[in-house]
Image (spheres, helix red, strand yellow):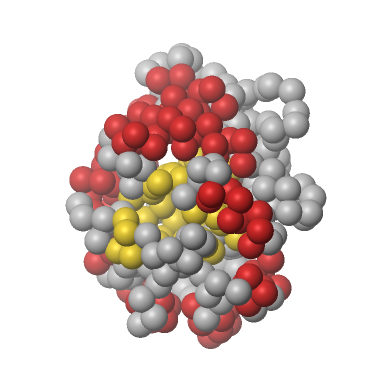
Amino acid sequence: MLNDKIRIKGIETQNRIISEPIVSDSGDNEGLPTLKTMEIYEAYANAGVGMLVMEQHAVHPWGRNKINQFRLYDDDSAKAMEPLTKLFREKGIPIAAQLNFSGAGASGKALLNEPDFKLFSPSGLRTPRDLIQTDSLALEIDQINEIIQSFADAAKRAVELAKYSGGVQIYACHGYLIGQFLSPLTNIRTDEYGGTLENRARILFQITEAVKNAIGDFPVSVRLGASDQMPNEGEKGLTLKESVWIAEQLAKMGVDWIGVSGNHCIYGIGADDNDTAYFSPYAEAIRKAVEKYGVLVDCAGGIRTSKTAKRLIDSGTCDFVGIGRPLIKDKSYLLSWNL
Ligand SMILES: Cc1cc2nc3c(=O)[nH]c(=O)nc-3n(C[C@H](O)[C@H](O)[C@H](O)COP(=O)(O)O)c2cc1C
């Protein structure tokens, strides 16, 4: 049933609908939430969703996406998120923090003037989307280690200082740094972080392990870019077969749930809005591989009606359905779903 409450570690969702992370562009230039942020998220807290994954937070100054992005790389920034998470905790709606290092996937050109910012990538290559249109530096091993540690430190701040009740989500899709490592289109390294699939996925596994060690009993999820192409396109770069293997390794490592989306094909920008659930073939394949480990799967992208949502759950395609764009404009969108 769509309105089943689902237990994940110590938390319980209100139903099977996840409010997917959506950058609100509402932070100030120090990356702190504003009154506008609070208004937006108060409306999300009343939207009838079972759980919310909060938009991406930077784990390191180098890893920012835009100047006004929320941050979890210092204690004060983390503490500033607590009033926001309280809106959800008071209603018993789990809220998870999405953790990101953008690398060459960054979009805010103003970052290039920030003294503590550096544009990095696995191999110094631009992403296919290339929003920042600037060459990046290939990461050295000690910098990779620093980034892995920054995910773990940010996760700790997320649950201890910002009080994200739903733990954290590692952002491994949409062409950001982890997705750049996963894809042979943006990773041509010849060391232990490039080449074979195991090597390309190494940083994700190391981040996952470090985060799990840092936050113990809280849920840890990964939003995984299942492929570099949309399901109706020819194969290029990261393939579904590869991401199914990655998902199974994550399940063996004890990840609690996996969100399925695209990698260099992003989240299906411009994909039709006609209730096609366009990533459902990817979610179904991944769920088949991880179900035996008790790992739950969330499918998002073009899901627009309760009929489709129920069909996806009933058919075993996924355990959760994710909603993104419909809730941006209309926080009462789910009312018509009669949950
Ligand atoms: C403006 C905007 C901002 C987004 N920000 C994020 C983000 O911070 N993290 C993320 O994982 N996905 C992000 N997404 C992708 C959404 O979470 C979701 O996967 C996508 O909108 C597809 O679902 P939908 O068809 O229900 O909108 C964003 C999408 C949009 C339109």
Q: Is residue 127 left or right of residue 137?
A: right
Front residue of 274 and 223: 274
* Quadrant assignment, res 208: top left
At horizontal 58% and vertical 35% (from top left) the residue drawn is: 282
Rendered location of residue 252, percent (x, y): 30, 32
Total marks shown come to 0
Quadrant containing the C terminus is bottom right
Q: Is residue 191 left or right of residue 176?
A: left
At horizontal 21% and vertical 55% (from top left) the residue drawn is: 217
At horizontal 58% and vertical 48% (from top left) the residue drawn is: 312
Rendered location of residue 151, percent (x, y): 34, 48
Q: Is residue 20 left or right of residue 139?
A: right
Taking the image as drawn, is residue 103 in sight? no
**Vertical arrangement, residue 131 with respect to residue 128, above or below:** below
Rendered location of residue 89, percent (x, y): 35, 77
**Vertical arrangement, residue 328 with respect to residue 155, above or below:** below
